[in-house]
Image (cartoon, rainbow, N blue to C red):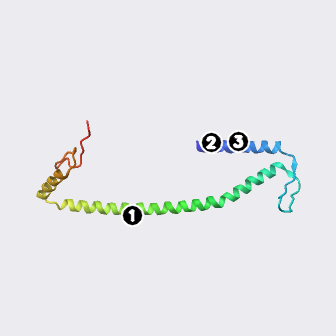
Amino acid sequence: MLRLVSLLTVLVLALVCVWLAVANRDLVTVSLDPLPFVLPAIPLFFVGLAGVFIGILSVMPTASVKAFLLRRRIKKAEKQIAALEKERGQLMAERDSLAAQVRPEDKRFADAQLAQLAPAGTLTGPANANQTVLPG
């Protein structure tokens, strides 16, 4: 679908360029006013196409630099994400190993402490320590 839209856009732009070229066949003299240069008489559509070409050439370096900087930022962010995921995995493994070492009597004590520290509106207890009560 995207290719079809792109193709239609290019086709419409090409038709507009052809129409402008046919409509502007008159010869014009181009002079660069403060400078003593005067170009020979050329068709007006060449002047327009030259302006578009010069505009494209002037924007390309800026766009290339921005794309390079964006790619560099993306790589840096991907490296940070990988490092954070690795750290998360290590922390989860450490948490699981510590949880496996908890004795049942310690777990009851920890649950009792959680019950005392729990904010209002939460269910507490061994099975429901992380569940919250929704207002009803």
Q: Is residue 51 above or below residue 132?
A: below
Mark 3: which secondary structure?
A: helix
Q: Which residue is drawn at 62% across and 42% down?
A: 5
Q: Residue at x 17, y 62 (%)?
A: 101
Identity of the residue furthest to the left in this view: 105
- Residue at horizontal 71%, vertical 44%? 13
Q: Position of residue 22 (x, y in %)?
A: 82, 43
Q: Do the residues labelled 3 and 2 touch (CB within 8 Å)?
A: no
What's the amino acid at mark 2? Val
Quarter-wise, where is residue 98 in the image? bottom left
Callout 3 crowding tier (Cα within 10 Å): few <14, some 14–19, many ≥20: few
Q: Residue 5 carries which label?
A: 2
* Figure check: 119 above or below 67: above
Q: Estimate how packed mark 2 is, as few (under 14), some (14 to 19) or many (20 or more) residues with alpha carbons within 10 Å.
A: few
Q: Which of marks 3 and 1 is nearer the N terminus?
A: 3
- Residue 83 marker: 1
Numbered disc in front, either 2 or 1: 1
Which residue is tagged 3?
Answer: 12
Foreground pick, 5 / 23: 23
Q: In which quarter of the image is the N terminus?
A: top right
